[in-house]
């Protein structure tokens, strides 16, 4: 496959197919944070769920230990994984494979089981507002139409 065709889950430029992914290859890649930045930010972010000083100190100690131990090797492996994935056309981002497996592959309801917040607002069609079956059918139809447009790159 040429670099202009889709390969695996990565969509790159395709000539004459549609507009949906035309500029995908021109988008900036999601940067991989440095190990130092991650080790600095993680304890601060965790403060909200760690009320005691001893928990915060333990988290900082574990982060320092990780940064001096396996952290650099794992960081290098992550950077190589991302670079190899982009060069091979297999991945567009280092989080793509995880995202696909964690959020797109489960056969359970993603909205109910993986999404922390989801609300169905009133639909734009007042005729369907009080008709649960009609509203459900309308949502399913719109979802399938969008999925078809993405698959066929006609969006």
Image (cartoon, rainbow, N blue to C red):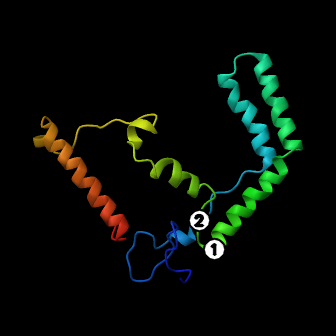
| Residue occupied by mark 2 | 91
> Please, which residue is most extreme toward the left here?
127
- Foreground of the two, 129 or 11: 11
> Please, which residue is most extreme toward the top here?
52
Q: Residue at x 81, y 30 (%)?
A: 60
Establish if 16 lies above or below 138.
below
Q: SS at mark 2? A: loop
Measured as percent of width and height from the top left, residue 101 is found at 52, 52
Q: Residue at x 36, y 65 (%)?
A: 150
Measured as percent of width and height from the top left, residue 132 is found at 16, 37
Measured as percent of width and height from the top left, residue 145 is found at 26, 60
Measured as percent of width and height from the top left, residue 11 is found at 49, 70
Labels 2 and 1 touching (C-beta < 8 A): yes
Mark 1: few, some, or many residues within 10 Å (few <14, many ≥20)? few
What's the distance in space between the residues labelled 2 and 1, CA to CA? 8 Å
Q: Quadrant of residue 45?
A: top right
> Please, which residue is most extreme toward the front here?
107
Q: Quadrant of residue 127?
A: top left
| Residue occupied by mark 1 | 88
* 83 sits to left or right of 69: left
Q: Quadrant of residue 26?
A: bottom right
Q: Residue at x 79, y 40 (%)?
A: 39
* 20 sits to left or right of 2: left
Q: Identify the disc placed on residue 145.
A: none
Q: SS at mark 1? A: helix
Establish if 70 lies above or below 22.
above
- Foreground of the two, 74 or 125: 74
Q: Residue at x 89, y 43 (%)?
A: 68
* 42 sits to left or right of 14: right
Mark 2: few, some, or many residues within 10 Å (few <14, many ≥20)? many
Number of numbered callouts drawn: 2
Q: Quadrant of the C terminus?
A: bottom left
């Amino acid at each position: 496959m040429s670099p202009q065709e889709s390969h695996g889950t990565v969509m790159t430029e395709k000539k004459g197919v549609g507009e949906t992914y035309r500029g995908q290859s021109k988008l900036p890649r999601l940067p991989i944070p440095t190990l130092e930045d991650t080790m600095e930010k993680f304890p601060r972010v965790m403060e909200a769920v760690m009320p005691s000083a001893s928990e915060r100190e333990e988290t900082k100690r574990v982060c320092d230990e990780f940064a001096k131990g396996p952290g650099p090797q794992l960081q290098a492996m992550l950077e190589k994984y991302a670079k190899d994935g982009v060069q091979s056309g297999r991945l567009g981002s280092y989080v793509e494979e995880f995202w696909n497996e964690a959020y797109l592959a489960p056969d359970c309801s993603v909205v109910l089981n993986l999404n922390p917040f989801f609300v169905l607002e009133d639909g734009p069609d007042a005729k369907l507002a009080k008709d649960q079956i009609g509203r459900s059918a309308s949502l399913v139809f719109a979802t399938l139409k969008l999925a078809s447009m993405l698959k066929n790159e006609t969006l």
